[in-house]
Image (cartoon, rainbow, N blue to C red):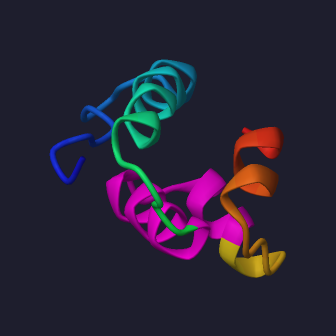
Amino acid sequence: MDKIRQAKGGDLKEYVMRFNGEPVLISDLQDVVAYAIFLNGLLPGRFKFYLVENKVITLVDALRRA
């Protein structure tokens, strides 16, 4: 799962779709860990800043806003 990253110049929607397929492969994956991996894989930019600025703290909420 640590290899899932948003491609340089890549589309956010594509990254979210690829990311969504991975957590189901890991049983008992905690939301906090999945969210940290999601944030780590995002390219620096407006959306990542938005998540941090608005104190989005769950993966579900981040994916909803994506």
Which one is in front, 57 or 9? 57
Q: Is residue 38 above or below residue 14?
A: below
Looking at the image, the residue that sits furthest to the front is 27
Q: Which residues are magenta?
A: 31-51
Residue 10 image offset from top left, x and y in percent: 36, 25
Residue at 20%, 54% (x, y): give it.
Answer: 2
Place residue 36 in its image quadrant: bottom left
Q: Is residue 34 above or below residue 23?
A: below
Image spot of residue 44 (x, y percent): 42, 59
Q: Report the number of numbered marks.
A: 0
What percent of the width, then of the height, locates residue 40? 36, 64
Vertical relation: 12 (above or below) 29: above
Give the farthest residue toward the left.
3
Does 40 sit left or right of 23 as displayed?
Answer: left
Q: Nearer the viewer, residue 49 or 62?
A: 62
Q: Is residue 36 left or right of residue 46?
A: left
Q: Is residue 60 left or right of residue 20?
A: right
Residue 46 included in the magenta stretch of the image: yes
Residue under the image location 82 percent in, 40 percent down: 64
Q: Residue at x 40, y 24 (%)?
A: 18
Q: Nearer the viewer, residue 17 or 30?
A: 30
Instruction: Say which of 14 and 60 sits in front.
Output: 60
- Asked if the magenta segment contains residue 47, the reply would be yes
Judged by its main secondary structure, the magenta piece is helix
Residue drawn at x 71%, y 66% as measured from the top left = 51
Percent position of residue 9, x then y = 33, 29
Q: Residue 58's quadrant in the figure?
A: bottom right
